Image (cartoon, rainbow, N blue to C red):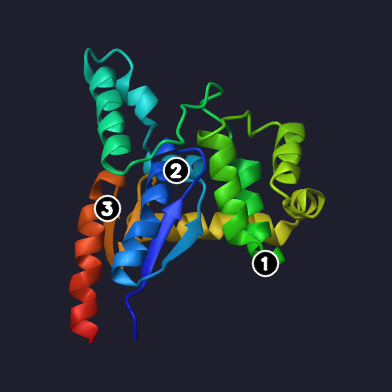
Amino acid sequence: MSVNVEYHFDFASPNAYLSHMVIPSITQRTGVKFNYVPVLLGGIFKATNNVSPVVLLKGVKNKGEYTQREIERFLAKHHITRYAFNPHFPVNSLAIMRGAIAAKRLGCFERYVDAVFDHMWAEPKKMDDPAVIAAALEASQLPAQKLLELTQDPSVKQELIENTERSVARGTFGVPSFFVGNDLFFGKDRLREVEEEIVIQARRLS
């Protein structure tokens, strides 16, 4: 038996992308693979009466500048060179999150996640424009037409809703969120604690 680790994510969050860039190194050190769970951040916010950091930071002197400095430190610490804030932020992620569900069904989930995160936060594009999404997926050699068609499937839409509802029921209020077993950790700055908990739980299971 191995440790069960879930990563609840939405492409709309820059911190979700930054976490995605660090996860492979944790997997390499621990041997534990993260199970990526697509959720809709807007749905989580609505269900928990939460708001985005952009809203929280509005009008607060110095906090925005400090947040930017924290990002710079994170990039340097983890040697992340491919990051640029999306000029179209906030991006409505509904279509691309449904696309993540569709990609699982088409067997290209990991490639899809890598590509869409890249198009959102490495070479940022307006990823709520259907034409832009299609072009980006095609450029990444993904089955754009099949993926976009499947995003309109009622069962795909329902699966994303159910993922989001289950996530909130387990305690999340935003992304990136991590579950190590049943223990919740929120935010990219908790990745060290996530790794520590993986090691602790792995020892218990050995």
| Quarter the C terminus occupies | bottom left
| Comes first in the chain, label 3 or label 2 | 2
The residue tagged 3 is: 191
Task: Provide residue 8's location: percent of width, then percent of height.
Answer: 43, 55
In the figure, is residue 193 to the left or right of 138? left
Amino acid type, label 1: Gly
Q: Residues within 10 Å of mark 2 (few under 14, many from 20)?
A: many
Task: Provide residue 11's location: percent of width, then percent of height.
Answer: 52, 43
The Cα atoms of the two marked residues, 1 and 3, are separated by 28 Å
**Residue 170 in sight:** yes
| Quarter the N terminus occupies | bottom left
Residue at 31% across / 21% down in the picture?
57
> Element at badge 1?
loop
Give the answer, above or below, for where 25 lies relative to 201.
above
The residue tagged 2 is: 17
The residue tagged 1 is: 107
In the figure, is residue 174 to the left or right of 129? left
Amino acid type, label 2: Tyr
Residue 199 disc label = none
Residue at 26% across / 25% down in the picture?
69
The Cα atoms of the two marked residues, 3 and 2, are separated by 13 Å
Task: Provide residue 92's location: percent of width, then percent of height.
Answer: 58, 34
Q: Residues within 10 Å of mark 3 (few under 14, many from 20)?
A: some
In front: 106, or 60? 106
